[in-house]
Image (cartoon, grey):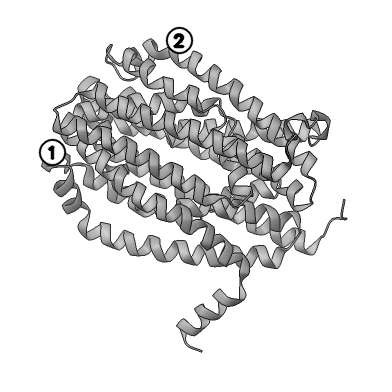
């Protein structure tokens, strides 16, 4: 049988893979256009502001996002984990209680995040960004947090209900709105305030639109009175909130170790040098997004399928799904990596300008780490679905502490290149350990089945 015939045979026989790819295609179509628009946003903002101001913009936005994620509880993972299990068992009242608890928690954390951000903005401006003007920038952009009142809950609900088209349409509309304002700023010689306004307007639109659509779908999926579901239908309190807090702490670890790189550069490097390094690093990450573009949608669509398979104890189906989505992600990642290896510098200088060329080495170094995480993107959702949220947390804490310690030693000496190398090493080691644990756990549960509840 030829390779093409085998692929077509697998496609016809594997309904689970077809569903994942079909749902991913909605988000992929949106994210492909959205990624192109995001690249346009990034290029226009970078050319308008220059490297240092572009780095300042990146640090302001990163700090606001970081505080939000610090308190977010990664609530969507909780909804997918427990809501997915309950819906698979047709226990809609229990799923409704889970959604209600998640929504109320997310509303409270959004308000708390804004208050915290407003209070700590001067300290961030003084000690991290090292620019007093950043205080007003941070407080202004932080208004976006108030629009995220049920974003995570709504997104997770739409994933569980296979309502991916509406989520994709909202994300696309957000990108169109943002790029329109940034394009106006570019051609009218706007400043950083107008660029921040563009991103803020897009975030507010996305938050309110997704919240409205998610709550509307909740009525269809769970019934008109789902908000009246009593909290005593939640999973055991210790298990439920342990999952929530471990997910939140996991998000905090990710925040400190991998998602605040431009802030670390600002903190570890002096003044203008930190802004320049942040500008180069932000440009490198923009290029790396080409690798992540079609795979990110698979994260949202694969997680619910993994949760369902674990709930059904369908280990063969789960293993087959993981092998096939890994093959898809690997094919894309290798193809784009080879392209960027040869054309990365040309792309950066063509779109961003010659002054951004120093971002190229960092982008190529980041390819290794982000490529590994991209191919094995399902690593953490697998352990969450298996009820092992603390293992990836432990791995990320240990590898993250090592990364941070080395950052203090290497970044002041070698700058953003060292930061990129440490980031790649972090991904390779942590993702490898998590995947190893997940596959061993599947093997163990398959050979030692537990009694049905």
277 is higher (above) or lower (below) than 90:
above
Which is more foreground, mark 1 or mark 2?
2
Percent position (x, y) of residue 14? 61, 72
Percent position (x, y) of residue 101? 70, 29
Instruction: State the residue at coordinates (40%, 34%).
Output: 406
Q: Residue furthest front?
A: 224
- Classify residue 280 as left or right of residue 326: left
Is residue 368 visible in the rendered structure shown here?
no
**Quarter residue 179 falls in:** top left
Whole-angstrom CA distance, mark 1 to mark 2, is: 36 Å
Q: For mark 1, does the 10 Å Cα neighbourhood hold few (<14), some (14 to 19), or many (20 or more) residues?
A: few
Q: Residue furthest bottom?
A: 1
Is residue 198 visible in the rendered structure shown here?
yes
Where is mark 1, residue-wise? Answer: 355
Instruction: State the residue at coordinates (35%, 40%).
Output: 175
Return the residue nearer the eye: 282 or 404. Answer: 282
**Quarter residue 258 falls in:** top left
Where is mark 2, residue-wise? Answer: 119
- Classify residue 336 as left or right of residue 398: left
Determine contact: label 1, label 2, CB under 8 Å: no
Return the residue nearer the eye: 122 or 266. Answer: 122
Percent position (x, y) of residue 39? 28, 44
| Marked residue nearer the N-terminal end (1 or 2) | 2
- Please, what secondary structure does the residue beneath circle 2 have? helix
């Amino acid at each position: 049988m030829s390779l093409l015939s085998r692929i077509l045979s697998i496609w016809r026989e594997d309904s689970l893979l077809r569903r994942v790819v079909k749902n991913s295609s909605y988000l992929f179509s949106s994210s492909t256009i959205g990624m192109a628009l995001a690249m346009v946003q990034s290029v226009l903002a970078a050319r308008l502001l220059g490297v240092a101001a572009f780095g300042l913009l990146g640090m302001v936005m990163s700090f606001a996002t970081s505080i939000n994620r610090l308190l977010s509880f990664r609530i969507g993972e909780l909804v997918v984990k427990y809501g997915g299990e309950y819906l698979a068992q047709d226990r809609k009242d229990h799923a409704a209680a889970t959604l209600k608890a998640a929504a109320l928690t997310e509303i409270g954390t959004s308000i708390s995040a804004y208050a915290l951000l407003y209070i700590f903005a001067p300290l961030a401006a003084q000690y991290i960004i090292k620019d007093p003007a950043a205080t007003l920038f941070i407080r202004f952009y932080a208004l976006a947090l108030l629009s995220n009142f049920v974003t995570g809950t709504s997104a997770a609900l739409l994933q569980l209900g296979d309502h991916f088209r509406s989520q994709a349409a909202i994300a696309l509309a957000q990108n169109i709105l943002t790029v329109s304002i940034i394009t106006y700023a570019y051609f009218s010689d706007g400043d950083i305030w107008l660029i921040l306004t563009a991103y803020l307007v897009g975030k507010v639109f996305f938050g309110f639109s997704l919240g409205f659509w998610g709550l509307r779908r909740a009525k269809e999926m769970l019934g008109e009175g789902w908000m009246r579901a009593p909290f005593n239908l939640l999973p055991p309190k210790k298990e439920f909130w342990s999952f929530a807090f471990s997910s939140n702490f996991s998000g905090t670890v990710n925040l400190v170790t991998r998602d605040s790189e431009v802030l670390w550069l600002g903190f570890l490097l002096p003044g203008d040098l930190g802004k320049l390094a942040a500008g180069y690093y932000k440009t490198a990450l923009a290029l790396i997004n080409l690798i992540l573009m079609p795979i990110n949608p698979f994260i949202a669509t694969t997680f619910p399928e993994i949760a369902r398979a674990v709930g059904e104890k369908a280990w063969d189906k789960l293993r087959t799904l993981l092998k096939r989505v890994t093959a898809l992600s690997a094919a894309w990642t290798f193809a784009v990596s080879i392209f960027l290896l040869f054309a990365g510098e040309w792309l950066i200088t063509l779109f961003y300008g010659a002054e951004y060329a120093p971002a190229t080495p960092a982008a190529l170094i980041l390819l290794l780490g982000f490529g590994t995480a991209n191919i094995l993107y399902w690593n953490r959702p697998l352990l969450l679905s298996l009820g092992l949220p603390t293992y990836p947390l432990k791995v990320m804490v240990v590898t993250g502490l090592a990364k941070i310690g080395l950052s203090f030693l290497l970044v002041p000496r070698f700058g953003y290149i060292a930061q990129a190398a440490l980031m790649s090493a972090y991904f390779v080691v942590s993702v490898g350990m998590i995947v190893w644990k997940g596959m061993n756990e599947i093997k163990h549960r398959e050979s030692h089945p537990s009694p049905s509840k």
